Amino acid sequence: MPILEGQDVTKYFGGLAAVSHIDFHVDQGEIVGLIGPNGAGKTTLFNLISGAIPFKSGGIIFKGQKLNGLKPHQICKMGVSRTFQETKVFADMPVLQNVLMGAFFGTPTHISGADAAKEASQALESVGLSAMSATPVHDLTLVNQKRVEVARALATKPELLLLDELMAGLNATETSETMELVTKIRDTGISIFMVEHVMKAIMGICGRIMVLHHGEKIADGTCQEIAANKTVIEVYLGEETHAGS
């Protein structure tokens, strides 16, 4: 059953269609990958879903409610949270305070300081950063800064998590550990829609993949179907990619 649906979603910047007449869906409990060349419209689609940029053509529906016209904080409180392509953290603040922002401002109802601290601590534990709660974020490695951003998103109590290039810049070990983290998050009942260029991650944990090119959806299917799709190979993969490789 879809938790998120897009119907004929279109966004122009001037005369350029950054996203053009896209239909898509994410089912409850799925990890769906979103791939395509740079400039294909992937982050634009995430910005439309999260309310970061407005659009007038088409509709995006979360749990039966249209997101069109809503502000980012309203969408977040409904249960949609995200991370960003370039990590956006409060670098001079300790890890715990970063995550508290999500607990205080992203949850759908008022929350006390004690309850927010509990939610933030649980989110940090879930991403493996409990021991670093007092550390200023600027002292963390890139992979741990990304985990802070994930923890802050989790502290909003989302039902859908949008991950924008979470694996970018990570080494092989960090990528494998982050893949395990994403799967663990899904196993808690949170559906995941993820933009990623690291094909090992996409093929390793996604149940389904959607491909964009020049703002248009050119494919949508299982890892095996996408890896064998000649159009996807031509415009993005370059050569045939085998699921799990």
Image: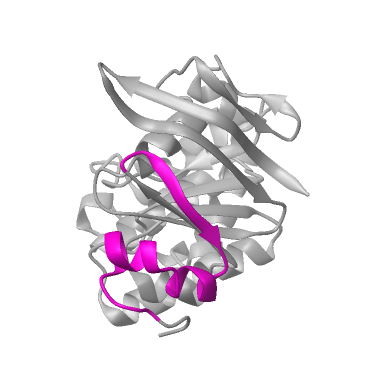
Q: Picture quarter containing residue 117?
A: top right
Q: Position of residue 147 (x, y in %)?
A: 40, 58
Q: Position of residue 138 (x, y in %)?
A: 21, 51
Residue drawn at (62%, 33%) of the image: 107
Residue drawn at (60%, 67%) of the image: 207
Q: Is residue 50 above or below residue 234?
A: above
Residue drawn at (46%, 18%) of the image: 55
User: Can residue 109 be seen by looking at this rendering?
Assistant: no
Side of 108 relative to 211 (left or right): right
Residue in the foreground of this view, choosing between 196 and 163: 196
Q: Is residue 217 magenta?
A: yes
Q: Is residue 224 magenta?
A: yes
Q: Residue furthest front?
A: 230
User: Can residue 87 be seen by looking at this rendering?
Assistant: yes
Q: Position of residue 111 (x, y in %)?
A: 66, 30
Residue range highlighted in magenta? 214-241
Name the image quarter holding the C terminus: bottom left
Side of 192 relative to 143 (left or right): right
Q: Picture quarter containing residue 4?
A: top right
Q: Is residue 124 above or below residue 243?
A: above
Q: Is residue 106 above or below residue 118?
A: above
